[in-house]
Amino acid sequence: MPQLVDPDDTTPLLRDDASSDDSQDEDYRSRWRSIRVMYFTMFLSSVGFTIVITSLWPYLQQIDDSANASFLGWIVAAYSLGQMVASPIFGLWSNYRPRMEPLVCSIFINMSANVYYAYSYLPRTNNKFHMLMSRAFVGFGAGNVAVVRSYVAGATSLKERTSAMANMSACQALGFILGPALQACLSFIGEHGFTVKIIYLQFNMYTAPALLASVFGLINILLVFLVLREHRVDDNGRQIRAINYTSEDRVDIQEETEETIDQVAVLTSNILFFIIMFIFAVFETIATPLSMDMFAWTRKEAVLYNGIIICCIGFESILVFLVVKIASQRVGDRPVLLVGLAIIFCGFFILLPWGNHYPKIQWADLKNNSLVSQMSEATIASNSSLEPTGCPFEQTWCQYVPAIHLAQFITSDILIGVGYPACNVMSYTLYSKILGPKPQGVYMGWLTASGSGARTFGPVFVSQVYTLLGPRWAFSLICVLVVGAIILLSSVYHRLIAFSVRHGRTVE
């Protein structure tokens, strides 16, 4: 059996640099080319989600005036529900067949669903339900995240894993930046845009992003076909013959399957990931309605300003990923996860309403109400625009819950922009290490499903609690949830260790 050389621990992940014979050198380069395709797939998946997230609410209001903020929660949740259903399916598929198959299938579903979303205005009735279905199918296509994570986890050694996962998260953050940035740029097309009559398409600031996401999907499919190859390595970086590997021209080290995985650590990791994704789903869902209620922004202003804010958070996340890669090498993955949760708690605690300044009430809902007599004519005139702005009167808490100031909103964004990416990358880095060198498709499918479940229940939870009880109750409950996550992590801290460390093959 030929001697295979481990990758240099200090080799940057984005360089093709190996010191072995020609065959091994080509194998090394092919492995990292394929990993980069996975990075790009994650990037495009992130773009495909965030490119419409800030315009969902105004688009929904435009095509169906019967929809309210509670239904928005269901639409945001539909994406994650679809992903939750699809992730274990695609994960299982990738364990036994070449990963190209589930990737191409899922991306094609995603492309078709984005086109469906762009045409959701076309039916004469029930437009909000068509939007709901389109987002569910977009989410189903996004179930390929389980395949991407399992591939990167299986194609990297233990020492490469954190950096590879951080790089993948950085690509996800870049997509997180570019999506809202593109939406903000496309907002200048306007709400009416123009019509392509031959295909009955209204090309405007709401449909253009979804169509652009479909074009990105086509590019992704081409890259998967042309570049992706199957690779798996053990914790030391030595090649393992993958179940779904089809080549017969190399000799590999057989996988060891006797040791068992710590199922308590697996379950705990899934719960922590659920909480982390639930918290961020709440944040991304409520940002647009909250800013419109508290700052009296119009629909167009909310799309533009929240797009800019999310872009800034994305840039901040990239810096966090760079710091995380260094910090995890110095202090370990678990302390970084713990600190990230503490920062998230601070972010939501700051967002709690304080003081005696109250939000502006939508004048359109007050003009036939007795409270209008208490308002000055100047106040009514200042609100007299084609589009009502401010906190809707039917949300009764608007009358007694203090307003959230813009400084609070921005500070919270900054803190959550630090805590969330650190927790995100550390949670599934730890998870992949706990699983070890065994095929991870199904396990990664369950992790993605738990995150998708969180992103299903999170928007529904916050839309209902926010609409009925207001931000004070919504964000207080989130603070309690974060404290619970910190307690859970502390209680099983000693079990969240790598598979090879647990079985004494390597030292932590």
Image: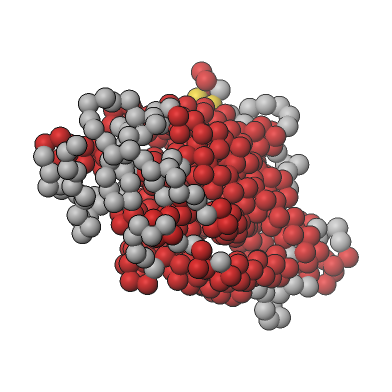
**Residue 287 horizontal/vertical position (percent):** 59, 59
**Residue 148 horizontal/vertical position (percent):** 42, 41
For the point 52% across and 68% down, which residue is it?
A: 493
Q: Residue 234, relative to residue 126: is it above or below?
A: below
**Residue 390 versus residue 275: which sits nearer the camera?**
275
Q: Residue furthest right?
A: 370
Q: Residue 26, relative to residue 176: is it above or below?
A: above
Residue 462 quadrant: bottom right
Residue 99 quadrant: top left
- Residue 377 appears in the figure: no
**Residue 197 versus residue 431: which sits nearer the camera?**
431
**Residue 165 versus residue 247: which sits nearer the camera?**
247
Quarter of the image that includes the N terminus:
top left
For the point 55% across and 30% down, which residue is it?
A: 113
**Residue 420 horizontal/vertical position (percent):** 49, 62
- Residue 470 appears in the figure: yes
For the point 53% across and 73% down, which residue is it?
A: 342
Quarter of the image that includes the C terminus:
bottom left
Q: How is the image coloured?
A: secondary structure
**Residue 42 versus residue 352: which sits nearer the camera?**
42
For the point 22% across and 30% down, which residue is it?
A: 250
**Residue 498 horizontal/vertical position (percent):** 42, 58
